[in-house]
Amino acid sequence: MGARGKRNTTTRRRPARWKRWSYLLIVVTAGGSAVWLLTPALRSEGPRPTGGDVVEIKGTMGGFSTKLIRAKAGRPLTVRLTSVDSRFHTDGGGKHQFAIDALGVNLIAPPQGTRAATFTPAQPGVYEYYCDICCGGRANPTMVGKLIVET
Ligand SMILES: [Cu+2]
């Protein structure tokens, strides 16, 4: 009688298979959310552990939010370009670009989205960046800026 009761208890205590799977699902979901939440915060909090700089730029039909960037030669620079415009803009479909020909940088942010590029300017100098998608393209003086690279 005693042994029988014990066996029944053991059987009852073992978690059902679906329960174990749901625990795993919760752990994976929670862990994934934590990583997802923490990563952008780490990226936008100034210099990263690699020693690079991060600059945030917004593109609208009015131009770039930042027209002048200062950087150090030989130091990684991350540009995060956000297009504030929606896809309903007839001019460029809400996309904006950040391009520096001399450094081979070409970033295109989708409507109401952000894209980032990390590059290391090796030589000091003044580099022009521009958007060639909207508002008459590169000829438009509002969608150009200067990257000043110092030693
Ligand atoms: Cu633009």
Image (cartoon, rainbow, N blue to C red):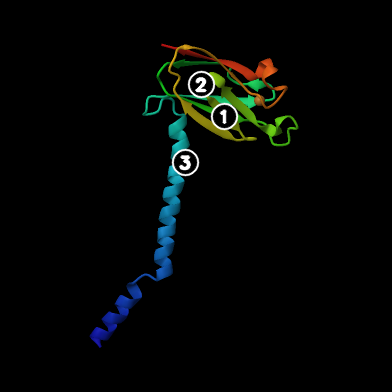
Tag in front: 3 or 2: 2
What's the distance in space between the residues labelled 2 and 1, CA to CA? 12 Å
Please tell me in which quarter of the rendered image ligand 1 is found. top right
Residue 66 at x, y percent in the picture: 58, 19
N-terminal-most mark, 3 or 1: 3
Q: Are marks 2 and 1 in contact (CB under 8 Å)?
A: no
22 w.r.t. 90: above or below: below
Element assignment for label 2: helix
Give the residue displayed 47% in from the left and 41% down from the top.
Answer: 37
Element assignment for label 1: strand
Residue 137 at x, y percent in the picture: 69, 22
Element assignment for label 3: helix
What's the distance in space between the residues labelled 3 and 2, CA to CA? 32 Å
Give the residue displayed 73% in from the left and 36% down from the top.
Answer: 88
Type of residue at label 1? Leu
Give the residue displayed 65% in from the left and 32% down from the top.
Answer: 95
Residue 142 location, quadrant: top right
| Residue closer to the observer: 93 or 82 | 93
- Mark 2 CB near ligand 1 (8 Å cut): no
Query: Disc 1 designates what residue?
Result: 107
Type of residue at label 3? Leu
Image quadrant occupied by the N terminus = bottom left
Neighbour class for label 1 at 10 Å: few (<14), some, many (≥20)?
A: some
Residue 127 at x, y percent in the picture: 54, 15
Of all residues shown, which one is farthest toward the bottom?
Answer: 1
Residue 111 location, quadrant: top right
Q: Which mark is residue 37?
A: 3
4 to the left or right of 125: left
Query: Disc 2 designates what residue?
Result: 103
Image quadrant occupied by the C terminus = top left
